Amino acid sequence: MIKTNELIAEAMSLPVEVRTLLVNKLLESLNPPNKEIDELWAKEAEKRVEDIRTGKVKTIPGEEVFKKISEKINP
């Protein structure tokens, strides 16, 4: 039987593409896809993109967001 540390070491030695596939499969095993929920999220994403395109919502640059977070954490 393979020990946990050996398994991890072997996984870490795999090419990046294979590790990515492995991670995705492991995550799916913990949280299996749900078609209904995936469709709802896709519709929500499309709505949000449309809201940005039409100017209904204003985007905030990432630098500004991180600056505000940093100011709150480190006053």
Image (cartoon, rainbow, N blue to C red):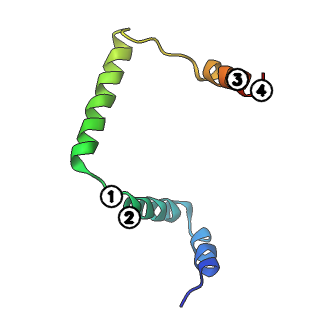
As drawn, the residue found furthest toward the left would be 36
Where disc 2 sits, the SS reads helix
- Residue visible at 49% across and 59% down in the picture: 20
Would you place residue 71 above or below residue 13 in this image?
A: above
Alpha carbon separation for disc pair 3 and 1: 36 Å
Residue 12 falls left or right of residue 30: right
Mark 4 falls on what kind of element? Answer: loop
Of the numbered discs 2 and 4, the one sitting upstream in the chain is 2
Local crowd size for mark 3, using a 10 Å CA cut-off: few (<14), some (14–19), many (≥20): few
Where residue 25 appears, x then y in whole percent? 41, 63
User: Disc 1 marks which residue?
Assistant: 32
Residue 72 tag number = 3
Quadrant for residue 12, please give it.
Answer: bottom right
Q: Which residue is mark 2?
A: 29
Cβ atoms under marks 2 and 1 closer than 8 Å: yes
Q: Nearer the viewer, mark 1 or mark 4?
A: 4
Q: CA distance from mark 2 to mark 4?
A: 38 Å
Residue 11: which disc? none
Instruction: Choose the circle earlier in sequence order: 2 or 3.
Output: 2
The amino acid beneath tag 1 is Pro
Whole-number angstrom distance, CA of label 2 to CA of label 3 = 37 Å
Where does label 4 land, which residue? 74
Mark 3 vs mark 1, foreground winner is 3
